[in-house]
Amino acid sequence: MKKILNLTFVAAAIVCLCSCVSSKKIVYFQNSDIMFEEAQDILQKYEMRLKPADQVLIKVTCDNPELLEVFNLDVTMGLGSRTGSANLNYGQSGSMGNVYGYTVDNNGNLLLPMLGTVYVRNMTCAEAAKAVENKIKEKNIIREPEVTVRLLNARVAVLGAVKSPHVVSLTSERNTVLDVLSQCGDVSDQALRKEVTLYREENGKRSKYHLDLTSTDIFDNPAFYVQQNDLIYVQPNKSQNVKSSAFSTFLGVGGSVISALASVTALAISIVNLTK
């Protein structure tokens, strides 16, 4: 009887151990107290740079709105306003209402009315605005224009073991991988937090970055700040791949049976001891 009891308890313990997950595998930013005893410098450059197929919104203002009428031929870059500034022009429907976006072509150029091509590839939005401004001055259209460029279609795709896989639209130019995962409801219970991969297109090449959510090293990772068109994949635990399999079902039922047998055996031994 004792041998049966011992074997039963050993089997139950094995099942319990298989179902337990170490906190070291799920806790984020471990040993962060040591790393952040003093404030850390941010070394990564997090600004997004324009790439082919990006869409941008361009706003032009000046002291004399009548000078902006030249752009009204295409109803795009700005509308004259009698209050002394130009409003954003909306000429094509999109996710932000009637927003007209200019697309960066494969050569890195924007084709703008009255200006022709403006090269903006690998520029920040601020640098692209300066390039458009210089082009306007070069054409002698407006002496002192003020130009704003805004990226319209920045997004990141998230796949794998997250609670809500989908394409995340970026609302600013400073977004971390944690911001994006938060918008997906965080990683799921089956996620391997040490095995997050980010794929990025850079200068005509595709790069791969490894991210470990449990380590504070993530803050220094060059992929900590996301770029438009990044792809994030969170690898699931192997148990997720077999959770619906016959083996998984057998293991779950077996665990329940073993636990029940352990309880019955313990009760039987107690009764036998009381009758002695």
Image (tube, rainbow, N blue to C red):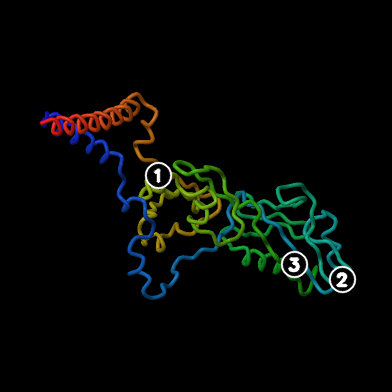
Residue 132: percent from the left, percent from the top? 70, 64
Circles 2 and 1, Cβ within 8 Å, touching? The answer is no
Image quadrant where one finds the C terminus: top left
- Secondary structure, mark 3, is helix
Check disc 1 and report the residue beneath it. Answer: 191
Check disc 3 and report the residue beneath it. Answer: 136
Identity of the residue drawn at 85% across and 68% down: 67
**Does 200 appear above or below 270?**
below
**Does 63 appear above or below 165?**
below
Q: Which mark is residue 83?
A: 2
* Quarter holding residue 11: top left
Name the amino acid, label 1: Ala
Identity of the residue drawn at 22% across and 37% down: 14
- Alpha carbon separation for disc pair 2 and 3: 22 Å
Q: Quick one: which residue is furthest to the front in this view?
A: 275
Observer-nearest of 208 and 194 = 194
Q: Which mark is residue 236?
A: none
Residue 19: percent from the left, percent from the top? 31, 39
Front position among marks 2 and 1: 1
**Mark 3 nearby-residue class (10 Å; few <14, some 14–19, many ≥20):** many
